[in-house]
Image (tube, grey):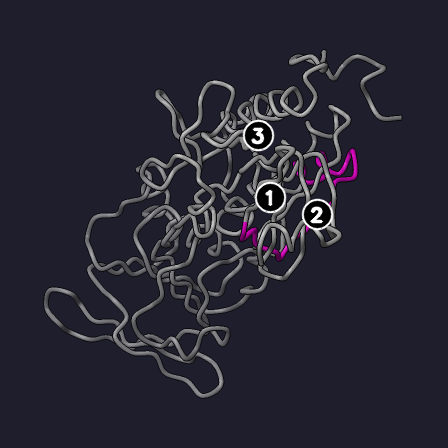
Amino acid sequence: MSSDELSGRTPDHDVDILIVGAGPSGLYAAYYAGFRAMSVAVVDSLSEPGGQLAALYPEKVIYDVGGIPAILGRELAADLFKQAQTYNPTMLLGHSAQDLHRLDDGSFLVTTDTGLLIHAKAIIVTAGIGIFTPRRLPVGQEYEGHGLRYFVPNPGELSGRRVLVVGGGDSAVDYALMLEKVAASVTLIHRRNEFRAHEASVAQLRESSVTIMTPYQVSAVYGDAHVEAVDVTDHDTKNTVRLEVDEIVAALGFVAELGPLANWGMELRHRHIAVDTTMATSVPRIYAAGDITDYPGKVKLISVGLGEAAIAVNNAAVAIDPSKKLFPGHSSDPDKHPS
């Protein structure tokens, strides 16, 4: 659809700022934009807010957010979502931003994969690592949704089950330790003897009740309507062992890509969006924050992403309305808070 055709269509949503990505940085940006009295829409392809934090690491303990000694990923995601709701942003979950059209006044029309049309005066991209797709288990894919899964957002669903976790990275080790608390048994297999996960997590794993099998990989999956057993084969000796399991959690990492964002005209560096000190991209009125950004000295921490979100929002506010102040004052001021 051409820009002329789009400009003649009434937008489904008309806002000051469109935030692409409902992860930690996006949720905080939604709060902060509301604090600056701007209308906001948040679009995310996932059906739940929280991004990677909620989808990949719901039970992982987060230690690097200022003022919070320790918090589970799902709890932090829930708190950020609650904070974002302070100023009632429009949450468009389950929608992926697709095509971008710039209008003569500098604003944008963005269409989603579901056909929604959003008009925004500025955009903040907080898409994390972009669209992430799990690396699929080479065998047994016919059991996906029937005992084979790639994410565990709710560990209680595997309560009392015999679980096989496949992988050697942080997600695999975190899932194994998380499920040890609820599952009847947990076995972790990895095709190498060495793990890629954090050393402290691996040490905790070795002290746990999780059965560790290396260097093994899944060679076959069995069952009728649901997973019932697997064959695992030693990578070195080629010996095969059959394990009776109810659930397979394949934590083999994921493939990340920018998807349609790569076609928005922004300068990219190694699948990340280049920004300056104002979090501005190379496209006027498009800003970015969080893990998706790249600049000299970039550090990928949740706490850093939250700060970037505030910088992006404040600079977007001035770009939209030059009469606004870059620094609006502190949120602790009584007249700045919602009643």
Q: Which residue is mark 3?
A: 285
Is residue 286 toward the left or the right of residue 12 in the image?
A: left
Residue 84 image-quadrant placement = top right
Q: Amino acid at mark 1?
A: Ala
Measured in 3D between alpha carbons, the distance from the residue under mark 3 to the one under mark 1, in whole angstroms, is 19 Å
Q: Which residue is mark 2?
A: 91
Residue 127 on the magenta span: no
Residue 254 in picture, x, y percent from top left: 37, 54
Query: Residue most toward the right?
Result: 339
Of residues 212 and 192, the one drawn nearer to the viewer in this rendering = 192
Residue 46 image-quadrant placement = bottom right
Query: In the drawing, what numbered circle is on residue 276?
Result: none
Is residue 239 toward the left or the right of residue 2 in the image?
A: left
> Does 330 sit above or below residue 207?
above
Q: Which residue is mark 1?
A: 22
Kindly identify the residue that appears in the image at 41 percent across and 73 percent down: 245
The stretch in magenta equals: 79-99
